[in-house]
Image (spheres, grey):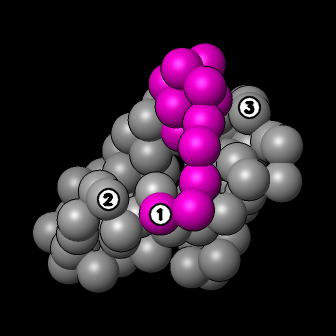
Amino acid sequence: MADGLLFQDAAFDSDTTRAMGDAFELACRSLHDSGQPDLVREIIAKRIVEVAKTGEHDPERLCECALVLLGISSAASHR
């Protein structure tokens, strides 16, 4: 996945970028590193970016939105 393409037409401040990174890490951990193909990780990243564009900046909610798209419930939603 080319980062330039992923963030094309989007600009985020450092706090939002950090929140998106945290959300991505949460989502990947919730998959228990079960050998998911790169495509799954790319879909998660794209969904996080899409949701962040709407103004959401909470890493747990960003993570949850990305995983719900895949039909996966995250551990973050059970805290």
Q: Which type of secondary structure does the marked residue at label 1 adopt?
A: loop
Horizontal relation, residue 47 to residue 1: left or right: right
Identify residue type, mark 2: Gly
In this view, the residue in front, 14 or 30, is 14
Q: Please give the residue where the numbered disc 3 appears in the rendered image.
A: 58
Q: Position of residue 43 (x, y in %)?
A: 44, 74
In this view, the residue in front, 32 or 19, is 19
Let me know if residue 15 is in the magenta part.
yes
Horizontal relation, residue 15 to residue 51: left or right: left
Q: Where is residue 74 in the image (x, y as percent from the top left)?
A: 60, 53
Q: Distance between the residues labelled 1 and 2?
A: 6 Å
What is the number of the mark on residue 4?
Answer: 2
Q: Distance between the residues labelled 3 and 2?
A: 23 Å
Extent of the magenta region: 8-20
Q: Which residue is drawn at 29% across and 80% down?
A: 39
Q: Which type of secondary structure does the marked residue at label 3 adopt?
A: loop
In which image quadrant can residue 31 be found? bottom left
Q: Are marks 3 and 2 in contact (CB under 8 Å)?
A: no
Q: Which type of secondary structure does the marked residue at label 2 adopt?
A: helix
Identify residue type, mark 3: Asp
Identify residue type, mark 1: Gln
What is the number of the mark on residue 8?
Answer: 1
Horizontal relation, residue 11 to residue 37: left or right: right
